[in-house]
Image: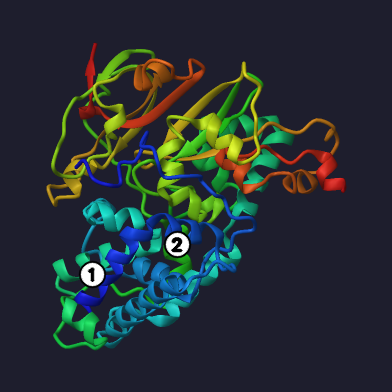
């Protein structure tokens, strides 16, 4: 979707403003937000792709003025309600009022080191050979899907070169919507700056994205 | 609750920039009253969520503590600095890192969440590398820890792909005009670690000494490794 999250190339946000010696958390609630988000991810009720899509569905004005942990919490509330774990009135009351759906697992303290050390790899075997080869010229799709995609707007309908074949990975555009993992080959595609940004742009700039195979067409 | 949040949203719309500015600068003297309201609202909202989830037996508050402790004390840019220092001193390791970063990094004990599929990109005299996630906040947690606020905020995500030299200037880095710049937008599940150029005058330094030169920003590409004079001073 062309949501507020798709920020590449937008202007007017002011300085990047790095904070010197920035702490990991700016307040206790951010710590709890991290822990809650990861713990609820362990339920196994939704995928990272559904979770990303919930974040990009936050209305633009709210998304752009929220801190990232706030974005996490807003999206998490949506996911918890959608999957039957926590209803909005329970958060309002700060009290459990209704029975919950059954999670596949509950993350307990003893599980944390192993779960974090393992992560959640999302490469998958596929039967097909890669459609494109390193060095090949490709064009990215021109589309505006209303669902989740990882092809940013600035890189649509652009001509670039396949730089690397990175393996086959879960396809987020399907997986975010419960249509299955449907893994596809992923390629690093590199574009010349002027191909993307046009006249007056930096000729010594190149930008790459990692693109699923169906985002690409041969030229 | 909903009504209250709506009010807060309105506040955010009007003061969005100030809000971001605050998050970028942390707890400082510019804390304003409105912001305190918003801040404590998030605190209440998250506390309510934790309470409900705990009452339902869906989360273990001690697991939350363990997660926070992991990312506050165990996993951070020191991991990545060790990877870079080893690559600077050990040619075989550097080649391994270039061809199979996930395995090379795992050999030093750094694995796991948001580091499952690693790629290392090497700065050279000809090309400087910069990493961004324009679509969300993808970041190599296993080697750099949790991302800083600015990495996840709109200004960086918007500007890094279109004006990376301008971004670098904000970080006090001016590249030679002839040096090319390559921006890696982390749009899939690969996570990128920049290997900065080894500073001059570090011949014979140990990996441990070298790791002190490797800053978090130098591994994102918004900085360079610290020059030796800075370390001596």
Q: Residue at x 38, y 57 (%)?
A: B16
* Mark number, residue A116: 2
Label 1 close to label 2 by CB (< 8 Å): no
> In screen coordinates, is B109 left or right of A150?
right
Q: Nearer the viewer, residue A64 or B104?
A: A64
Give the chain of mark 2.
A
> In screen coordinates, is A29 left or right of A157?
right
Residue B167 image position (x, y, % from top left): 53, 36
Q: CA distance from mark 1 to mark 2?
A: 35 Å
Q: Residues within 10 Å of mark 2 (few under 14, many from 20)?
A: some
Q: Residue at x 23, y 79 (%)?
A: B1
Residue labelled with disc 1: B6
Residue A67 sits above or below residue A88 on the image: above
Q: Nearer the viewer, residue A108 or B107?
A: A108
> In screen coordinates, is B135 left or right of A87?
right
> In screen coordinates, is A79 left or right of B202?
left
Residue A185 image position (x, y, % from top left): 28, 31
């Amino acid at each position: 979707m062309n949501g507020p999250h798709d920020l590449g190339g937008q202007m007017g946000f002011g300085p990047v403003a790095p904070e010197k010696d920035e702490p990991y958390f700016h307040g206790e609630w951010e710590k709890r937000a991290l822990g809650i988000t990861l713990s609820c991810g362990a339920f196994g009720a939704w995928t990272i792709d559904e979770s990303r899509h919930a974040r990009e569905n936050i209305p633009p004005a709210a998304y752009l003025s929220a801190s990232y942990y706030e974005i996490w919490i807003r999206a998490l509330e949506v996911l918890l309600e959608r999957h039957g774990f926590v209803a909005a009135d329970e958060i309002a009351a700060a009290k459990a009022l209704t029975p919950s759906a059954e999670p596949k697992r509950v993350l307990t303290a003893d599980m944390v080191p192993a779960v974090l050390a393992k992560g959640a790899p999302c490469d998958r075997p596929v039967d097909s050979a890669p459609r494109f080869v390193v060095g090949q010229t490709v064009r990215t799709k021109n589309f505006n899907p209303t669902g989740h995609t990882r092809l940013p707007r600035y890189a649509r309908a652009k001509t670039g070169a396949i730089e690397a074949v990175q393996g086959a990975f879960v396809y987020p555009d399907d997986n975010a919507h419960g249509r299955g993992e449907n893994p596809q080959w992923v390629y690093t595609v590199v574009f010349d700056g002027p191909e993307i940004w046009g006249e007056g742009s930096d000729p010594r700039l190149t930008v790459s994205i990692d693109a699923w195979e169906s985002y690409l067409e041969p030229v | 609750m909903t009504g209250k949040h709506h009010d807060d949203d309105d506040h955010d719309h009007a003061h969005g920039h100030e809000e971001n500015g605050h998050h970028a600068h942390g707890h400082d003297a510019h804390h304003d009253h409105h912001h305190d309201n918003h801040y404590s609202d998030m605190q209440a909202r998250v506390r309510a969520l934790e309470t409900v989830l705990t009452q339902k037996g869906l989360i273990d508050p001690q697991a939350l503590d363990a997660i926070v402790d992991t990312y506050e004390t165990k996993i951070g840019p020191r991991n990545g600095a060790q990877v870079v220092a080893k690559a600077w001193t050990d040619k075989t390791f550097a080649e391994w890192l270039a061809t199979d970063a996930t395995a090379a990094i795992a050999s030093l004990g750094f694995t796991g969440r948001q580091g499952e599929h690693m790629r290392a990109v090497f700065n050279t005299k000809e090309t400087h590398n910069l990493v961004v996630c324009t679509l969300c906040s993808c970041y190599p947690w296993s080697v750099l820890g949790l991302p800083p606020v600015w990495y996840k905020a709109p200004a960086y995500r918007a500007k890094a792909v279109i004006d990376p030299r301008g971004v670098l200037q904000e970080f006090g880095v001016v590249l030679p005009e002839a040096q090319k710049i390559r921006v890696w937008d982390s749009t899939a599940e690969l996570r990128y670690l920049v290997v900065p150029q080894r500073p001059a005058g570090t011949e014979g330094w140990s990996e441990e000494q070298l790791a002190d030169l490797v800053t978090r920003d130098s591994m994102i590409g918004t900085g360079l490794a610290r020059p030796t004079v800075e370390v001596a001073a």
